[in-house]
Image (tube, rainbow, N blue to C red):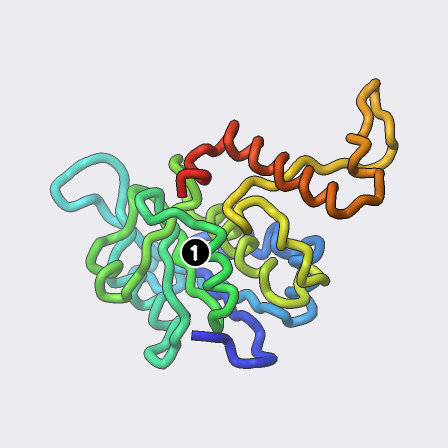
Amino acid sequence: MSRVANKPFAASIITLFPEVFPGTLGTSVIGRGLRENLWTLQTTNLRDFAFDKHRSVDDTPAGGGAGLVLRSDVLAKAIDFASPKDDTRPRYLLSPRGKPLTQKLAHELSHEDGVILVCGRFEGIDQRVIKSRNLIEISIGDYVLAGGEVAAMVMLEAIVRLIPNVLGSSLSHQDESFENGLLEYDQYTRPIEFEGQTIPKILTSGNHKKIAKWREENSQNLTKKRRPDLLKK
């Protein structure tokens, strides 16, 4: 689905810590895009949907074990509030066991009306709410964080920077890592000489054809050395 023209990308985050947002998403060009309504951010406090006076949102895992699990009934209420039945935005659960976040997926999501992001905590969330609310588990890397808030910021930044006019130029991200299946080439700027190192002469030659060739070869070499798995793809 493509976003309706002139309609801002709408991000909704369900979290135990709404006060941490927008965080870094409110700074630099990403923050400017937020202030200019190119995209919007809404947070929902999971504790507002607790059933008891203590605002409990978790319980011990069925079958025993360490830690706590977010309750399905509490989380379902929060999701239904943030994303009513007629909401077509995809719903994602930030989780280390999810499918990897990729540049390709970020591009796809940047054309959606927005996203619903659920920030996991503790040992995870009840599987039944994942199933009943069609949550897609997504991971930002092969490691574990204390919660999904930082991961949600990473995912949102990867998406919203691709929205037209957020970066200011449609060309700003075209040569970046992963855009063409390769890592980005080395970058340089003034001064020409720094601590005995100089900018490769080809980059100051003015010969754009040779510069493009150098950058392509540099990207290929970097990718082969650091991420050979990308070349296999």
The kind of residue on which mark 1 rests is Thr
Residue under the point 60% across and 38% down = 219
* Residue furthest out toward the top: 196
Image location (x, y in percent) of residue 21 = 56, 55
Q: Is residue 94 left or right of residue 224?
A: left
Up/down of 123 relative to 115, above or below:
above
Q: Nearer the viewer, residue 102 or 144?
A: 102
Relative side of 211 to 78, left or right: right
Quadrant assignment, res 193: top right
Q: Quadrant of residue 122?
A: top left
Q: Is residue 51 visible?
A: no
Residue 155 in sight here: yes
Q: Quadrant of the N terminus?
A: bottom left
Q: Is residue 32 left or right of residue 101?
A: right
Q: Nearer the viewer, residue 115 or 220?
A: 220
Q: Residue at x 64, y 38 (%)?
A: 185
Q: Residue at x 29, y 46 (%)?
A: 124
Give residue 100's position: percent from left, percent from top: 39, 47
Question: Taking 43 as reference, is 61 above or below it?
Answer: above
- Estimate the x, y position of residue 229 in percent, counting from the top left: 42, 36
**Dot 1 lies on which element?**
strand
Q: Quickly name the residue at label 1.
A: 15
Considering depth in this image, is 110 or 209 the residue closer to the camera? 209
In the image shown, does 121 or 49 lie closer to the viewer? 121
Residue 161: where, in percent of width, then height?
Answer: 60, 58
Sort mark 1 into few (<14), some (14-19) or many (20+) by Cα contacts within 10 Å.
many
